[in-house]
Amino acid sequence: MHNNKVLVHKDNRKNHCCLPGGRIEIGENSEETIKREIKEELGKEIEIIDYIATIENFFEMEGKKYHEFYFLYKVEFANDEDKKIDYTMHNVEGKEYLHYEWLDLDKIDTYNILPQCLKEILKNEKSPVHVINDDLKNAK
């Protein structure tokens, strides 16, 4: 989050956006993961500022059911010049369908961001929190 905005990634093939991140590798902790993923996806170094939440997310996508864990951190770019970035960025790994944009936190309810519980977490001043988001149960 920076200047009352949050950075999300958008896959041009889908109709929603998500927070940047990725899968934890064997032997890696969640803090190391977000640092590695941002470096891989954006070519930027980050610093972890705060731990925000854990989300247990149950959902279905393309006919498959998933249970994933989100570890949310407030981070900022390590480089002072990078902290000035307010424009859309592109994936540096060659994934041309991915781009990264800043969403205004004051308008967070108007965006299709998944999981939906992120909206309340991002607006909430209290952290850390543990949230169970069960779209499978809600779909019944």
Image: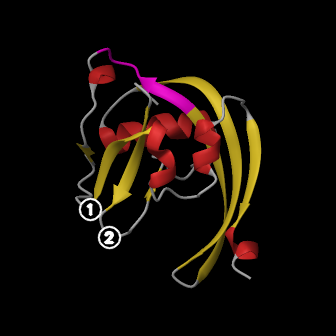
* Residue 75 point in image, percent of width and height: 50, 28
Label 1 crowd bin: few (<14), some (14–19), many (20+), radius 10 Å:
few
Tag 1 residue: 97
In which quadrant will I find the C terminus?
A: bottom right
Tag 2 residue: 13
Vertical side of 83 occupied by 59: above or below: below
* Residue 86 point in image, percent of width and height: 28, 31
**Looking at this view, is 126 or 42 the one in front?**
126
First reached walking from the N terminus: tag 2 or tag 1: 2
Q: Does residue 31 appear to the left or right of 79 in the view shown?
A: right
Mark 2 and 1 residues: CB-CB less than 8 Å, in contact? Answer: yes
Residue type for callout 2: Arg
Q: Any magenta on residue 78?
A: yes
Residue at disc 2, secondary structure: loop
Q: Does residue 50 appear to the left or right of 9 in the view shown?
A: right
What residue is at 44 percent from the left and 29 percent from the top? 4
Vertical side of 137 occupied by 33: above or below: above
Vertical side of 21 occupied by 58: above or below: below
Residue at disc 1, secondary structure: loop
* Residue 30 point in image, percent of width and height: 62, 39
**Quarter of the view holding residue 85:** top left
- Separation (CA) of disc 2 from disc 1: 7 Å
Label 2 crowd bin: few (<14), some (14–19), many (20+), radius 10 Å:
few
Q: Which stretch appears magenta? A: 74-80
